[in-house]
Image (cartoon, helix red, strand yellow):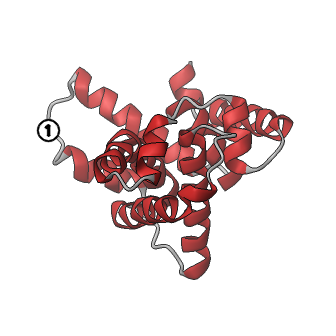
C-alpha cells in the first residue's frame, strides 16, 4: 500500500516500480488471452494508463495485483468487442520466440514442443475456462483473487477450474499416458 500512496502523491519512480513489478505478469497474461504480442502490449499499456487515472478510486479491498488483473481483463474484453482480433496461434508465437527448430531432437526441443502443445491446447478451451486456468496455474492467483478479478463468485471459479482441468486432461491424453 505504501507504493500506491507514493504513486497517488505523484511519485513517478513509484509508478515505474509498479510497472516493473506487475508489467511482465500482465503482459504474459495478455499474450495468453489475445494470442499476439502487439495487442497484448496495447492492452497492458491501456491497463497502466487506466490504473494511473483510477488510482484515486483504488480502495485496497483487493490486492493491487488483483485490481490490475481486473483492469487488464476488462481491457481485453473491450479490445475484442471493438475489433476482431486477428488470432495468431500460440504455436506461431512460440515458434517466433524460439527461432527455427533444429533438425536434431533434444530434450530442450521436446520440452519446447510440449510447451507449445500445452499453449495450443489451452487456447482451445472456452474463454471463461482459459482465463481461470491462466490466472490460477500460470499467474498463481488464489481462488478468491480470481473471483475478485473476474467479478464472479468463488464457486464459479471453482467449477470453471474443475471443468477446464477435466477438458485439458481429455485434450492432453497422449502426454498424460
User: Measuring 65% from the left and 28% from the top, which residue is drawn there?
Assistant: 142
- Residue farthest to the bottom? 83
Tally the numbered discs: 1
- State the SS at label 1: loop
Characterize the local packing of mark 1: few (<14), some (14-19) or many (20 or more) Cα atoms within 10 angstroms: few
Q: Position of residue 86 (x, y in %)?
A: 45, 73
Q: Which of 84 and 170 is in front in this view?
A: 84
Which residue carries the number 1 mark? Answer: 102
Residue 79 at least partly seen: yes
Q: Where is residue 95 in the image (x, y as percent from the top left)?
A: 27, 50
Relative to 35, residue 146 above or below = above
User: Measuring 50% from the left and 33% from the top, which residue is drawn there?
Assistant: 138
Q: In which quarter of the image is the C terminus?
A: top right
- Residue 174 horizontal side relative to residue 116, left or right: right
- Residue farthest to the top? 177
Q: Position of residue 58 (x, y in %)?
A: 61, 51
Residue 166 at least partly seen: no
Q: Nearer the viewer, residue 3 or 122?
A: 3
Q: Position of residue 170 (x, y in %)?
A: 67, 33
- Residue 87 horizontal side relative to residue 91, left or right: right
Q: Give the quarter of the image for residue 141.
A: top right
Q: Nearer the viewer, residue 4 or 138?
A: 4
User: Measuring 61% from the left and 66% from the top, which residue is drawn there?
Assistant: 77
Q: Give the quarter of the image for residue 88.
A: bottom left
Relative to 129, residue 161 above or below = above
Relative to 102, residue 91 above or below = below
Amino acid at each position: 500500500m505504501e507504493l500506491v500512496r507514493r504513486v497517488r502523491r505523484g511519485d513517478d519512480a513509484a509508478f515505474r516500480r509498479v510497472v516493473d513489478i506487475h508489467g511482465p505478469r500482465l503482459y504474459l497474461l495478455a499474450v495468453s488471452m489475445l494470442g499476439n504480442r502487439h495487442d497484448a502490449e496495447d492492452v497492458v499499456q491501456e491497463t497502466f494508463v487506466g490504473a494511473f487515472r483510477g488510482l484515486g478510486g483504488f480502495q485496497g479491498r483487493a490486492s493491487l495485483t488483483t485490481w490490475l488483473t481486473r483492469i487488464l481483463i476488462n481491457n481485453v474484453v473491450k479490445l475484442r468487442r471493438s475489433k476482431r482480433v486477428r488470432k495468431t496461434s500460440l504455436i506461431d508465437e512460440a515458434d517466433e520466440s524460439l527461432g527455427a527448430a533444429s533438425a536434431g531432437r533434444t530434450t530442450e526441443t521436446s520440452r519446447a514442443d510440449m510447451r507449445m502443445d500445452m499453449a495450443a491446447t489451452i487456447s482451445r478451451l472456452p474463454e471463461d475456462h482459459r482465463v481461470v486456468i491462466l490466472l490460477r496455474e500460470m499467474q498463481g492467483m488464489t481462488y478468491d483473487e480470481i473471483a475478485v478479478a473476474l467479478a464472479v463468485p468463488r464457486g464459479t471459479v471453482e467449477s470453471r477450474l474443475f471443468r477446464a482441468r477435466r477438458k485439458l486432461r481429455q485434450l492432453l491424453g497422449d502426454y498424460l499416458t
